[in-house]
Image (cartoon, rainbow, N blue to C red):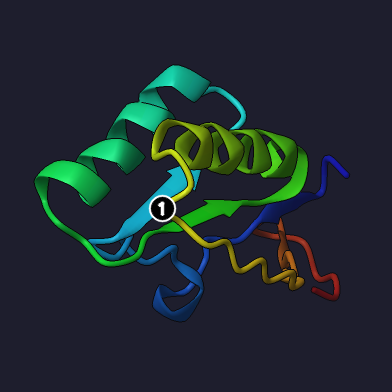
Amino acid sequence: MEDYRRSEKSEQEQVSPPAKNEVRCSQNGKITRYVEVGLNLLQEQKMSDIVVVGKGASITKAVTVVEIIKRRMEGSLHQYTQLGSVSSTDQWDPVEGKDMDR
């Protein structure tokens, strides 16, 4: 492994910025903050729908956020759940001066 370095991601693989109605949950964020953002979008910014996204270990956090928002909105929301998968491929390049395969 010391003969290889991970190559930089191309522009196509870079993460796009979230949409105006999207709340992206990460492993490090706080549930209360995500709930505040979601309620702000629904109540103050009058969005008709929001999207809460979680990947990997943050999926359970995203589900918890949605359930809390639904409870605080007192039955005025409907939930649509969509599951999917994302695949990623890492590319490793040989260190300079080495004649090795990628």
Above or below residue 52? Residue 78 is: below
Nearest the eye: 23 or 57: 23
Say whether residue 16 is left or right of residue 62.
left
Q: Residue at x 45, y 56 (%)?
A: 77
Label 1 residue SS:
loop
Residue that carries the numbered disc 1 in the rendered image: 76
Q: Position of residue 78 (x, y in %)?
A: 52, 62
Residue at image x 60%, y 69%? Answer: 80
Return the x and y of residue 33 as percentages of the image width and height.
37, 23
Left or right placement of residue 60 versus residue 28 in this view:
right
Q: Is residue 87 visible?
A: no
Q: Residue shown at 54%/54% (left/top)?
A: 53
The quarter holding residue 40 reads top left
Name which residue lies at 80% across and 70% down.
99
Q: Quadrant of residue 65?
A: top right
* Dot 1 amino acid type: Ser
Q: Quadrant of the N terminus?
A: top right
Q: Is residue 102 above or below residue 72?
A: below
Assign the C terminus to one quadrant of the image: bottom right
Query: Is residue 55 rendered to the left or right of residue 89?
Result: left
Q: Nearer the viewer, residue 91 or 55?
A: 55
Q: Can see residue 44?
A: yes
Query: Residue 60: horizontal and vertical position, in percent?
Result: 73, 37
